[in-house]
Image (tube, rainbow, N blue to C red):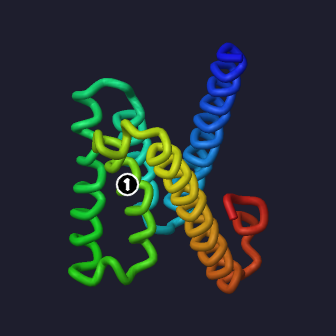
């Protein structure tokens, strides 16, 4: 019975990490494409920071968990620089949700209890899904903007757009 639980736990853990990696790669590729076609580069840098923060936060080492909160600090600093004190009212503040969840992984009070850890993993997964949805919406908006500027050029027909 214990062997079955260990096996199912490993399968669920592997599946969870696989889903996070797929959503994270979608965010990075979507942000890269948006930056290439002339959109904002914030999501690209936020995705890279979140990737590094994910690696730091989800490792079992104590020192790397202490460094996991720096991603949140960097994202807040970038949002403050680009949008001023009203940065929380901007749609780009959605990038803070996974950063906050990853920072909470470093707190022993939350990461040592299984129920709280499962809730935190669920919050992290949902926040990455929300970030991916916002990035998709902004890319779709940018494509719509470029479609309104259509002037019959072949690069618009067969190019990146």
Left or right of 19: which side holds 92?
left
Left or right of 19: which side holds 60?
left
Query: Which quadrant of the view contains residue 59?
Result: top left
Identify which residue is drawn at 70% across, 26% down.
8
Identify which residue is drawn at 27% across, 73% down.
82
Looking at this view, name the residue that lies furthest to the front.
1
* Above-or-below relation of 127 to 152: above
* Above-or-below relation of 86 to 73: below
How many neighbours does mark 1 have within 10 angstroms: few (below 14), some (14-19), or many (20 or more)? many
Identify which residue is drawn at 75% across, 66% down.
154
Q: How many marks?
A: 1
Q: Nearer the viewer, residue 56 or 38?
A: 56
Query: Which quadrant of the view contains residue 143?
Result: bottom right
Is disc 1 placed on a helix, strand or loop?
helix
Return the x and y of residue 54 as percentages of the image width and height. 42, 40
* Above-or-below relation of 39 to 20: below
Left or right of 123: which side holds 13?
right
Work out which quarter of the rendered image holds the N terminus and state it.
top right
Return the x and y of residue 6 as percentages of the image width and height. 63, 19
Work out which quarter of the rendered image holds the C terminus and state it.
bottom right
Q: Which residue is mark 1?
A: 99
Left or right of 1: which side holds 117?
left
Looking at this view, name the residue that lies furthest to the top.
3
Return the x and y of residue 153 as percentages of the image width and height. 72, 72
Q: Nearer the viewer, residue 15 or 140?
A: 15
Identify which residue is drawn at 68% across, 13% down.
3
Return the x and y of residue 73 as percentages of the image width and height. 23, 56
Q: Nearer the viewer, residue 139 or 56?
A: 56
């Amino acid at each position: 019975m214990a062997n079955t639980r260990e096996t199912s736990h490993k399968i669920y853990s592997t599946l969870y990490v696989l889903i996070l990696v797929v959503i994270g790669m979608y965010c990075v590729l979507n942000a890269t494409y948006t930056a290439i076609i002339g959109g904002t580069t914030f999501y690209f840098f936020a995705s890279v920071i979140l990737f590094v923060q994910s690696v730091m936060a989800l490792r079992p080492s104590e020192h790397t968990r202490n460094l996991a909160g720096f991603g949140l600090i960097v994202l807040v600093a970038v949002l403050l620089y680009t949008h001023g004190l009203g940065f929380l009212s901007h749609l780009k503040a959605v990038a803070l949700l996974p950063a906050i969840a990853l920072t909470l992984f470093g707190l022993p009070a939350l990461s040592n209890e299984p129920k709280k850890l499962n809730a935190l993993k669920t919050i992290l997964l949902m926040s990455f899904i929300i970030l991916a949805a916002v990035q998709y919406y902004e890319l779709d908006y940018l494509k719509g903007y470029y479609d309104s500027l259509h002037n019959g050029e072949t690069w618009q027909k067969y190019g990146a757009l």
